[in-house]
Image (spheres, grey):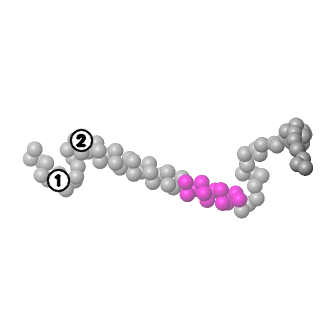
Amino acid sequence: MPVVVHASAEAGATDTAEQPEKPKPAASIEDMPLESKQQMILEQRARMKVAKKLRQRRKRLVQKRRLRKKGRWPPSKMKKLKNV
């Protein structure tokens, strides 16, 4: 003889309603242990170095584009361009 069982969603909901999950605040560097601080600082330095290299590369490309537009790039052709 089969037994029919109905589960109620309310029973599980009351347990979770009593203990709401608190969102974790963003970790501040002052509260962290020393190793974590050093690791975060090293990661930040690595990101900054990559960003600096990207900025420098973009600056070089923009400079070359402007010089090409004016007819002053590549530098090896400057002697040929003197007559023009």
1 shown above or below 6:
below
Pointer 2 residue: 69
Element type at mark 1: helix
User: Which residue is drawn at the image coordinates 74% and 60% (left, top)?
Assistant: 34
Type of the residue with mark 1: Lys
Label 1 neighbour load within 10 Å: few <14, some 14-19, many 20+: few
The residue located at (72%, 45%) in the rendering is 26
Quarter of the image for residue 33 reads bottom right
Q: Earlier in the sequence, mark 1 or mark 2?
A: 2
Identify whether 3 is placed above or below 41: above
Residue 66 percent coordinates (x, y): 28, 42
Query: Magenta residues, as a range?
Result: 36-47
Q: Label 1 vs label 2: CA separation?
A: 14 Å
Mark 2: amino acid: Lys
Residue with the mark numbered 1: 77
Q: Can residue 12 be seen from the camera position used here?
A: no
Residue sitting at x 14%, y 53% = 79
| Quarter of the figure with the C terminus | top left
Locate residue 42 relative to residue 35 in the image: left or right. Answer: left
